[in-house]
Amino acid sequence: MRALITIVMVLMVFAPAAFAQTDDQAGNTDVKKHYLYEWTDSKGGVHITDDLGEVPKRYRSKARKIETPKGQEQVQGRTQSSSGAATEQQETASKAVWQQRIQDWKEQLADAQKRYRDLDQKRRDALGMWGGSATGHLEGRAEAEKIQKEMDEVQLDIDEAKNMIETVIPEEARKAGIPPGWLRE
């Protein structure tokens, strides 16, 4: 809950600033892309900022760069948007963050499921070697038990990803007043 409040507060405070920054010193009037940076602290809190310098050093390498959606680039220090409304830009940025969170967990789920299938095949191969000598039987069984322990750990990753996708993130979104459709798009 605390992480969700942090996300909403950061978006409300920094999103307008992210879209309104200029490069006055360089006199640059070209179209510029702007990014938000998202990172998770050691307690699981998710944070978002528009300045990588505000990300604590120990989290910078893991901070994810999120490009603002097309149609929201800056020209001569002013935000140019197809609608021109700052609130729409904030909503679009917020929607992108929520969708990226879901997408990241879906990718983690797919990776964990693939690892699980690979380990399962490896375990079956180890068990298939039982036809040999008595020592071969014991070696194959020991290898299969070792692989099973790895599979149990990967299953925990699968369960965590499913819980985040199906329960935690939708509940956080509901509490934040985020439309459910944002998570399905």
Image (spheres, rainbow, N blue to C red):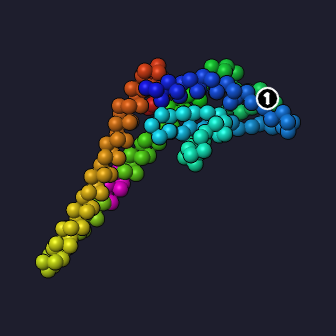
**Residue count near mark 1 (Cα–Cα under 10 Å), binned few <14, some 14–19, many ≥20:** some
**How many numbered discs sit on the rendered protein?**
1
Element marked by disc 1: loop
Position in image of residue 174 (x %, y %): 42, 22
Q: For the view shown, which residue lies furthest in the left direction?
A: 134
Kind of residue sitting beneath label 1: Gly
Residue, x 56% and y 44% (percent of image)?
59
Is the N terminus in the top left, top right, bottom left or bottom right quadrant? top left
User: Compared with residue 4, is residue 52 higher up or lower down, i.e. above or below?
Assistant: below
Position in image of residue 104 (x %, y %): 47, 42
| Residue 117 falls inside the magenta stretch | yes
Q: For the view shown, which residue lies furthest in the bottom direction?
A: 133
- Answer whether residue 68 is visible to the viewer in this image: no
User: Compared with residue 9, is residue 54 higher up or lower down, i.e. above or below?
Assistant: below
Residue, x 47% and y 21% (percent of image)?
176
Position in image of residue 133 (x %, y %): 14, 80
Q: Which residues are magenta?
A: 113-118
User: Compared with residue 31, is residue 88 higher up or lower down, i.e. above or below?
Assistant: above
Residue, x 28% and y 65% (percent of image)?
122
Q: Which image quadrant is residue 51 in?
A: top right
Left or right placement of residue 138 versus residue 159 in this view? left
| Residue 151 falls inside the magenta stretch | no
Q: Nearer the viewer, residue 171 or 52?
A: 52
- Answer whether residue 87 is visible to the viewer in this image: yes
Left or right placement of residue 110 versus residue 145 in this view? right
Q: Can you identify the residue that label 1 sits on?
A: 77
Q: What kind of secondary structure does the magenta stretch mostly adopt?
A: helix
Q: Nearer the viewer, residue 11 or 127?
A: 11
Residue, x 34% and y 36% (percent of image)?
163
Position in image of residue 28 (x %, y %): 84, 37
Q: Which image quadrant is residue 125 in?
A: bottom left
